Image (cartoon, rainbow, N blue to C red):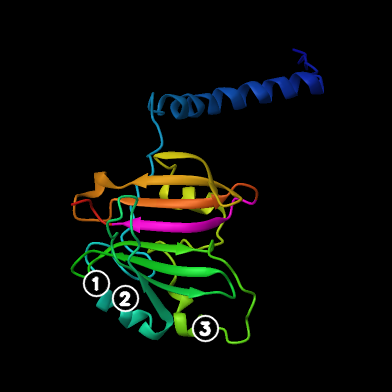
Amino acid sequence: MKRVWTKFSPYASTAVCVALLLATFSPIVCSQTTSQIPGQTKDTAPRVNELTLAGLRPGRDSLGDALKHFKAKYSSSSSPRGPDQTESPEMKEWGDACTGHSLKVELDGHGLIEAITLSSLVPQDGKCVNRRIDALNMKDWATGHGLRIGDPRNRVTETYGEPDSSGPSMRDTKELEILRYRFGWAGSEVPQDMTIYCARESGRVLEITLARPAR
């Protein structure tokens, strides 16, 4: 009996191979698809609050603690009067007129720090011969999470998230943006408020204030 040989074209052979591959791997693909959990979402980032500014904690540290970090001979004191001519809380301020940077603490009647402000909005006199940066320990002028004067605005939101409120503001002739954070959700014994001013044009941080819980 004469054998009959069937001749396959290269195209038919390729089609058969593809079909075999699909038959082999299709169960795996289906398994991967059905293993996904419907409605699955990424974890949200935890909220972050702030405890310290320039190494000091409002509501817990005192003027004595501040004087351990920053020398008294480079400070100035004031007790400004409010609109009703009553004395406002005492202020203690350290500043460098060369750079226009200042550190200010607001004290209650017992010398406890109520609020701390770092600012680059004070007047500069341009006299930089006798610089006092080392004496003022300005390397410590930052929040507990490392935010500093001059940092970009996006560093603020990357660290603390979006502010509870924000809007335009003015300081003399400077156009600013104010960012307000409320930390009441973190508990009543931690600093409750942080206010940050950024330059509208450059977006750089110009001032940071951290305040104690209201009494």
Q: Find out whether the residues at labels 2 and 1 contact each other: C-beta distance under 8 Å.
A: yes
Say what amino acid the circle numbered 3 marks.
Answer: Arg
Mark 3 or mark 2: whose residue is earlier in sequence: 2
Q: Residue at x 52, y 80 (%)?
A: 133
Instruction: Count residues near mark 2 (Cα–Cα under 10 Å), then give few for <14, some for 14-19, many for 20+.
Output: some
Query: Eyeballing the image, is 133 above or below 57?
Result: below
Q: In front here: 50 or 63?
A: 63
Q: Find out whether the residues at labels 3 and 1 contact each other: C-beta distance under 8 Å.
A: no
**The residue stretch that appears in magenta:** 202-211
Q: Between marks 3 and 1, how big is the CA–CA gap?
A: 23 Å
Q: Between marks 2 and 1, how big is the CA–CA gap?
A: 7 Å
Count of all numbered marks drawn on residues in the image = 3
Residue 199: image x %, image y %?
A: 58, 51
Residue 137: image x %, image y %?
A: 45, 79
Residue 46 in sight: no
Residue 66: image x %, image y %?
A: 31, 76
Residue indicated by mark 1: 62
Residue 31, picture quadrant: top left
Say what amino acid the circle numbered 2 marks.
Answer: Ala
Name the secondary structure under disc 3. loop
Q: In front here: 49 or 120?
A: 120
Residue indicated by mark 3: 132
Q: Is residue 119 left or right of residue 1?
A: left
Name the secondary structure under disc 1. loop
Residue indicated by mark 2: 66
